[in-house]
Amino acid sequence: MITPAVAATTTRSGALQIMLLLASGVVAAAQIGKAIISLPMIRTELALGLDIAGLIVATFATIGALFGIGAGVVVGRFGMRRSLIGGMGAIVLGNLIGANASNELVLLVARIVEGIGFFGVALAIPSMLARIVTREQRDFVMAAWSAYMPTGIMLMLLLGPLLPTIGWRNLWLASAVVTGAFGVLLALYAPKLPAAERAPAGRFLTQIANVVRQPSCLVLAAAFFAYSCQIFSLAFALPLLLTSAYGVALGTAGLLSAAVLAVSALGHVGSGLLLRAGVPIWANTAAAFGFFAVTLFAIYGGVLPPAAVALVAALALGIGGLAPGAIYAAAPHAAPTQQAVPATIGLLQQASNLGQFAGPVVLGWSVEHFGWRAAPAILVPIALLGLAAALILRFRLVTADASGAPAPAPVRSVRRR
């Protein structure tokens, strides 16, 4: 998504390129929602157990948790444009394999192929955006990029009522067609960065160490871990909380949960607007985690009616959505060099996926043994970790900006002839 404010401060072709990159990220993120919405039908047709079904949904998170920063280094070496187009091609291939899968092994292979393509796209696009926009636009555009994940997932969830008619295999084939079309558009119109902008050849572990040794990068990773713990714990817990603790019908709980998740995308975009208005990166992040810490007691305390619980959860995810937008905006500031931006974003993705895994698991264990009212005892300290990271960023990023290091000029896009 791009707003008129960005379009007014860029050339028309530059604005169109930004829109294409952001939309391509949404298409890539839709592959996560596609698996979620298709899973009931896939389980019935292929007779999958819950363990395999969970693995199919969690494939992307597993890949990111294991290889995030390493994948960022690979994208930096391979080149952002080639990684982007190749990633879209891998998603197409994975969809075609999955649509024709005869058993769970083939389907799992398809998801791994898709996952590799997804990270090629998800790491290349923000790195490319950081290079093609001006410094004044960069924070806003990076924050707008952060909305790609909830937007892509929600678009697929909205197709749920049509799935019994079209079938999950046709959905995957349609996804291959749409992704392929975006791949062609990217091959024609995606910005071309000079070869000098690729990460220089060098030892793989050395490039990773250069990012990990940067304190600002570690603080951002801690903040993203804390955010993912919060949002995925809430997305996991809300339907269960409404049905088990309040007796809400499953269908109603699902609709409420989907609406709550949709609100988070507004927070992502809102972060960009606040950054553009001059609100500091650290303040956006602090507001998100401060609100999480306060509202957790209302959500899990058992004192509100179910409609109020859903409303508070929506507010938490909406204001909490300020955090990822600010974190993505901070990544180019925190990276040790411009060439290290892909690896820095890879570190953030790795931390995010660790939180995506750890949050629901720890919360589920806590609720199983101690009940819903024990949830704040787990989640509030994680929110405070994010708040502490935000306060540290106040000084780390100010120090970095005050160092006088010049921001690189935006790269002029070059179309392929």
Image (tube, rainbow, N blue to C red):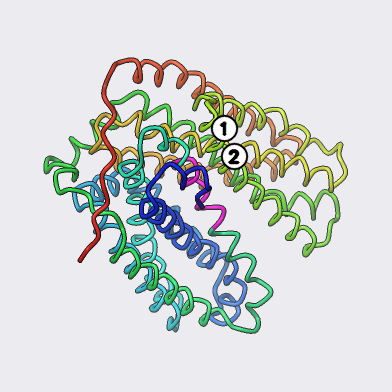
Q: Secondary structure at mark 2?
A: helix
Q: Tell me the kind of residue under disc 1.
A: Leu
Q: Which mark is residue 132?
A: none
Prevailing secondary structure of the magenta residues: helix
Alpha carbons under labels 1 and 2: distance apart:
6 Å
Q: Quadrant of the C terminus?
A: bottom left
Q: Percent position (x, y) of residue 228?
A: 53, 42
Neighbourhood count class around disc 1 (C-alpha, 10 Å): few under 14, some 14–19, many 20 upward:
some
Q: Which residues are magenta?
A: 142-151
User: Which residue matches tag 2?
Assistant: 270
User: Which residue matches tag 1?
Assistant: 274
Q: Nearer the viewer, residue 255 or 10?
A: 10
Residues at badges 1 and 2 in contact (C-beta under 8 Å)? yes
Q: Secondary structure at mark 1?
A: helix
> Which residue is pictured at 51% across the width and 19% down the height?
391
> Which residue is pictured at 65% across the width and 41% down the height?
318
Q: Nearer the viewer, residue 160 or 322?
A: 322
Q: Tell me the kind of residue under disc 2.
A: Gly
Q: Nearer the viewer, residue 165 or 280?
A: 280
Q: State the image quarter where residue 94 is shown.
A: bottom left
Q: Percent position (x, y) of residue 341?
A: 30, 38
